[in-house]
Image (tube, rainbow, N blue to C red):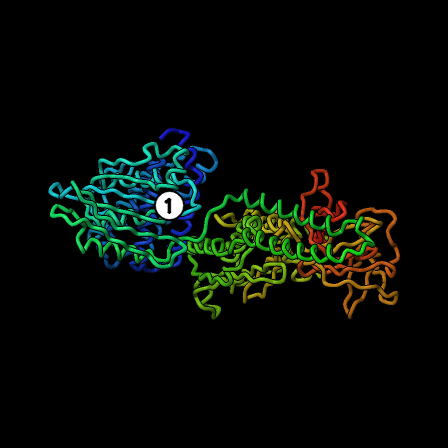
Amino acid sequence: MNDFDRESMLEMFIFEMTQLVDQLESTIVQSESEYNIDQINEIFRIMHTIKGSSAMMMFDNIAGVTHSLEDLFYYLREEHPENLDYGKLSDHVLSGADFVKEELHKIQDGQQADGDGTDLAKSIDKFLQEIKQPGGQAQPEQAQTSAPQPTAPSESTPKTSTAGDIMRKFRATIHFQDGCEMENIRAYTLAHNLQDIAQDITHEPQDVIDEETIPAIRREGFVTEFTSSHDYASIHKHLNQTVYLRELILEELSMSETTMVETPAVAETPAVVETVTQEASPATVAPSPQDVAAAAADTAQRKGTASHMISVNVSKLDALLNLMGELVISEAMVTQNSELEGLQLESFHKETRQLRKIVTNLQETVMSMRMVPLSATFFKMHRIVRDMCRQLGKDVQLDIIGEETEVDKNIIEHIADPIMHIIRNSIDHGVEHPDDRKKSGKPEKARVLLEAKNSGGDVLIIIKDDGRGINTAKVLAKAKSNGLTSKPDAEYTDREIMQFIFLPGFSTNDQVTAYSGRGVGMDVVTSNLDVVGGTALVDSVPGEGTTFTLKIPLTLTIQEGMSVLVAGAQYTIPIANIIKSFKAQPENLFTDPSGNEMITERGEIFNIVRLHEFFNIDGAVTDVCEGTLIMLENGEHVVCLLVDDLIGQQQAVVKPMPKYFKKVRGLSGCTLLGNGDISLIIDVAGFFDK
């Protein structure tokens, strides 16, 4: 394979290997106490796939480690050893997964995947030998090469034949699913994997890796002929595991006859059709009834597994979303054109209502395409909990609720780190050791709850533990010693004190450990949430536990906004932050001793922020009673914003601010109005910075 061909395959290799490693980790951490046969088969299949793909891409170090793990799980699958140390087994598998992930990160960054997995492979081999010996004595280690050698048979690699086995000749025609893309690479991978069980392999097209062969493969399929000592059912089973397989036609050839089993696996057809055609001849070399039955059973097992999904590059979804935003703006420009004011256009307005309906439905569809469930992010936390419990000697159960909740792809990338750091903080700082929990009357096994749920246009992510809670006196003392306090200690509420833990460099640990003490963890929470317009709240009860609540928007690109008028200019406020709007009454206004304007509303007192003063705008309404107050919330904080007037609700297509505007507090972006004017989008969190 030349360098150009290899580079063209890297993107698909990284994508598929990352999915397999995530699937592997999820399987391990959820069933660590004991593996059932299905889980062993699943891990074996993953290792076999990673090994084969890595060898094909010439990443021999990855292939060597996964080959050792494949040997290990082949033995577990075939021999079912008793008294197995599943914890130690999981450690080996997760060490292998970490090695693969590290190498994949190097490949993604354009570096050489040069990690040395020799010691890891030897450790896995030694563990396998210990399992094989009832007394626990390992046999002498065999030399471990970096490149995989096909020693262990598998579901897709039938058992090695002996010299006396009969050689058979086969022809296979493979059709891939429509829309799977990169058919030439998939055909090359299939031919490469055949080398484990076949010889004298030929295929059409011959130069399969050339991209010009893709139309021919889509139209006529990928045809390969080979000889093998394995029987028909084994070959059929091996080929039937091809990724994105739509149709398989396998023939066992002889001098003059052909026996064909056709196995369509079309996604649109729930039933799988099996057709057997034979020519009557004494010399026919046909698969036995047992072979056909085995092939049919294997096909039936695949029934309904054809994917209805295709993979799309994220950049294409971003481009589609940008076009969707432009369409929303164009629709507003047409329907709100100032030249149409005063004209009686009943038919036009009827048609524009239909257009608006279509645009809205299209927008919802485009947005739903970008929505990603939180399940993958949530389940990764099992690994964090497992590793910390082993290193800290704690016993913690992670419970997950609402993992099917969806958020925008761009947002999910910014909240994985905050969730991880909060869970680390809960286990390291909050959860007590089992002995301490037992003394205080708590169950020795602590619980950490990770929950997600929808709340209007936002998603709430809740991380709750039943640990010791936050010592507010210790936090306040640390904040005071760091010079972070600005008022007497007695004036701080518990919730205000707990917000100190999110400040950069703040830590209550006196010693630096692998998980805490440097004051960088919780700072990541607020910095990442600020990027997506989210907030974090903390509630804690001493001796009972702590609850972190993250509030994040569903999406950042197209938002419902309220247009307001200030000094003749329009501003847009996200609807999600608005509680209500109202007119102020003179008797409800007053000024506190510090000179801040306040208003009482339904028995509560709120600060008043004048938008024109906040941005130094001249010509705005200055009398509070003449303007309009908009009550805004950001987390637990509420403020009343003074504007001249309300214009109305509309969809805001969020555009980034120019570079010279990025440091302006209180602005998050801008949007284009129907008349072509630009409206600045208010960042509500900016009003609560001071």
Q: Is residue 16 above or below residue 563?
A: above
Q: Does any portion of residue 507 appear in the rendered image?
A: no
Q: Is residue 251 left or right of residue 641?
A: left
Give the total number of marks visible in the rendering: 1
Q: Is residue 357 above or below residue 254?
A: below
Where residue 37 appears, x then y in whole percent? 29, 58
Q: Is residue 674 left or right of residue 325?
A: right
Front-lying residue, 104 or 298: 298
At horizontal 66% and vertical 45% (from top left) the residue drawn is 326
Q: Does any portion of residue 265 appear in the rendered image?
A: yes
Where residue 87 appears, x then y in whole percent? 34, 55
Q: Is residue 454 left or right of residue 107?
A: right
Q: How many residues crowd around disc 1 within 10 Å: few (fewer than 14), some, or many (20 or more)? A: many
Where residue 6 appears, x then y in whole percent? 40, 33
Where, quadrant-wise, is the N terminus in this rendering?
top left
Where residue 165 appears, x then y in whole percent? 13, 44
Q: Is residue 226 left or right of residue 441?
A: left
**In terms of secondary structure, where does tag 1 sit?**
strand
Residue tagged 1 = 176
At horizontal 72% and vertical 47% (from top left) the residue drawn is 667
Front-lying residue, 116 or 562: 562
Front-lying residue, 679 or 304: 304
Quadrant in the rendering for residue 495? bottom right
